[in-house]
Image (spheres, rainbow, N blue to C red):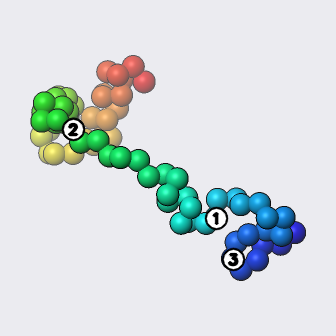
Amino acid sequence: MALSSRGKSGSGMDFGLNPRIRARRNKKQRRELSEDQKIEIREAFDLFDTDKSGIIDYHELRVAMRALGF
């Protein structure tokens, strides 16, 4: 049972290879964060960005993950 050039098998089964159908199935409405939520995330980020570089490097991420219990 070989796949044809269209990506469908001879048995008529669909293995999720049709991107048009998959795109329709995965569409979800995006929710926006409120300003309070954005501020809270920024404050939490700043706690772990100890060198104030604007990114969390490996060592800072490790500290953050331990603080979260991972």
- Local packing at callout 3 (Cα closer than 10 Å; few below 14, some 14-19, many 20+) is few
What x and y, as percent, mark residue 2? 83, 72
Image quadrant in which you'd find residue 19: bottom right
Q: Residue at x 17, y 35 (%)?
A: 34
Which residue occupies 42% across, 24% down?
70
Q: Which residue is mark 3?
A: 6
In front: 34, or 43? 34
User: Which quadrant is home to the N terminus?
Assistant: bottom right
Q: Which residue is mark 2?
A: 33
Q: Is residue 11 visible?
A: yes
Q: Is residue 50 visible?
A: no
* SS under mark 1: loop
Provide the secondary structure element on which disc 3 rests: loop
Q: Which residue does the numbered mark 1 point to in the structure image?
A: 17
Q: Residues within 10 Å of mark 2 (few under 14, many from 20)?
A: few
Quadrant in which residue 40 is drawn? top left
In the rendered view, tell whether residue 21 sits above or below residue 42.
Answer: below
Q: Are marks 2 and 1 in contact (CB under 8 Å)?
A: no
The three-letter code of the residue at mark 3 reads Arg
Mark 2 or 1, nearer chain start: 1
Q: Quick one: label 3 or label 1, which is nearer the N terminus?
A: 3
Q: Position of residue 25 (x, y in %)?
A: 52, 53
Counting from the top left corner in percent of width and height, residue 14 is at 71, 60
